[in-house]
Image (cartoon, rainbow, N blue to C red):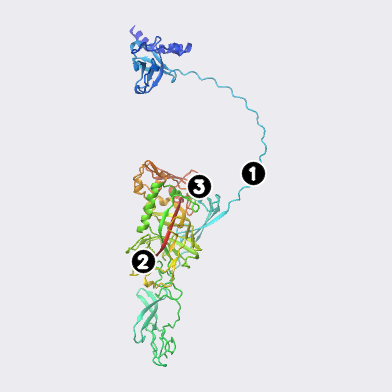
Amino acid sequence: MNRDLGRMNRLAPIGAALRWMACVAATSLAACSSGGATSEGSVSPPSNHVYSIAVVANTVGALPKCTSSLYGTTAYVKSPSSLYSCIAGTWVPIPCATVLGGAVAYASASQTLLACVSGQWTQVPLPQGPPGATGATGATGATGAQGATGPQGATGDAGAVSLVVQVPVSSGTACAYGGTEIQSGVDKNGNNLLDGTEITSISYVCNGATGQAGAPGSQIQATPEPAGANCAAGGERIDVGVAGDGGFVVEQMAYVCNGISAVSDDAATSADVAPGGPDGGTVDASGTGSASDAGADSGTSGAEASSGSSAICGDGIRDPGEDCDDGNLTNLDGCDHLCRFEQDQRVNWLKLQFASDAFCPNDALGSAFMSVAQTTIQDSLDNGIGDGSISILMRMSGLTDLSGTNASGLNVGVLGGTPVPGMGYSGNADLDWWYTVSGGLTAERFPIDAVPGSIAGKVLTAGPGVVTMNLGPIFGPLRFYVLDLHTTIGATNVPITSAAASPPGHLLSEHLDPALTSFATMGQKNPLGAGTICGRARASSLAQIPIPASLAGQCIEGYTANNTVLDLLVGGCVVYPFQTVNRTQPDTGDPTMPIAGAGPPYSLAANGTHIVTTCRDLSGTEVPLDTCLSSAAYSAYLKFATDRVIIK
């Protein structure tokens, strides 16, 4: 019998719930539910043991205030599962006691059913009704009438043009000894540039191997000759020979003697020069010897070599037609191997642009940085220019018009340099200062990185070509594809002469023509008059530059010393609460490099430590990262001004 009573107690809540659902189905919720408050301050069960839940809250603290409008309202609190009734301004708990065994509560809004089971208000799952039958498919509508023929379309745009671009290439797989890469394709986007995705054909015109060194050429040495048997009034001894392992070997010797005043019409009045072998020549002091006479018997003096007056570069004597002669045939020492003045320039004013304009319509690199970061970057550039740690040098090879008015066929070589220490140095005003270079040169001391250029009407235009520019600690040695370099050329002046064999100025040993002038500056130090460089910064270069500590330590992204400037661009930087660096993808490519997959623009992705590890090409296909970064590039824009310097 006890077992039967226990079974009845367990089934009582379920039976009550079923009776309640039957009641609702037969009548209404109001008919099946009755209030739970009989008087203020007490709670009694409804006659049918069915509570109607009007308020649902997650916790007791989340219940609304018990006001007169809620008097007698039943509330369900989810945690812990319990019922409350609003009585006399207080939410009073409705315990699941023995007297309420089998009672139920229902929330119609959420279709939640509770039952008082074993002293706990317990949620009871409601049965799921059977699904209804699927309705019949409607009939297909009738086909509409054919529309009228539209008007003829407008005439299409003119077809795209084909472009051919020549790009210098260094020694490598394509050309063992360097040469020229010929790129061709159709300019599909009409920007007058052959983008990487538009290249359909690439061929190479390669340089031949360097020939064997020729036999040593003759050299000339001039030494003072005192008055004596060889030259009565003194002069110079001219030795012609070759340099060997044992030193200079004299093959021919001659004397250039000073003239002596005539004492009579019969006396010798000229300086006679006698050529001879290694043992030396003789001078006929009487004027009747075999050496050629210089001057006449009238008493004039002179000094002429019997071999004529042809100029020899590198003999330390500036001859007619030479700008200078420093006694050697070395380039980059103020006087080149042809005894021509070396026109070198250094950037002494540099501004990274943070927006594009008509000259440079794309500027993804600069546009990535917001105002705070812009100040940090520009301060770094200004400081580097001022102290010389940022020294971008330009060598004007092949320039014949030193006034900078008109010239063609020149190359603008780009080098990095270091100022020679000296009193009063300022990188912002360093006219004719000395700068040394330690790399980037051929064996003949010509710049490896150079872009073709020309001058017309005092305006230099150069490009395209690839160079390396050191932009200091933030952008470091940046591999840069120059699309267009454009600048005005300033006035000319006489180069400075060194006062004490130290900078600034040219050495006396260069024997510089005192009448020589050359242009002293390019561009102006203001946004409107400055020179401009529009190009593309290679992503692989940015991936080699460590992220600046001044930015990494402030970004909430959590960059470390293992991250790079490329990681910063791809991941962005927030210095709370401001966006300091926008997340920026490379928007273009370097046309001198092999493309990865379908080509640019590429999409880069980083791992959990913000290091770029994945690249996808134009079609979204993952491609090798190294090839991608060498081809991917950020459009960039710089403004600059320069002054004349001396590269050593």
**Left/right of residue 309 with respect to residue 118 in the rendered view:** right
Above or below 284: residue 580: above
Q: CA distance from mark 3 to mark 2?
A: 53 Å
**Please, which residue is most extreme toward the front here?**
68
Q: Which mark is residue 504?
A: 2
Q: Position of residue 215 (x, y in %)?
A: 42, 73
> Looking at this view, is 397 or 429 the one in front?
429
Whether residue 554 is situated above or below residue 310 in the rendered picture:
above
For residue 241, which numbered disc appears in the image?
A: none
The kind of secondary structure element at disc 3 is loop
- What residue sits right under mark 3 in the picture? 598
In-front residue for pair 289/388? 388
Q: Is residue 153 visible?
A: yes
Q: Of marks 1 and 2, which one's residue comes earlier in the chain?
A: 1
**On-image quarter of the N terminus:** top left
Asked which secondary structure carries label 1, the reply is loop
- Residue under label 1: 153
Looking at the picture, which amino acid does disc 2 mark? Answer: Pro
203 vs 47: above or below: below
Sort mark 2 into few (<14), some (14-19) or many (20+) by Cα contacts within 10 Å: many
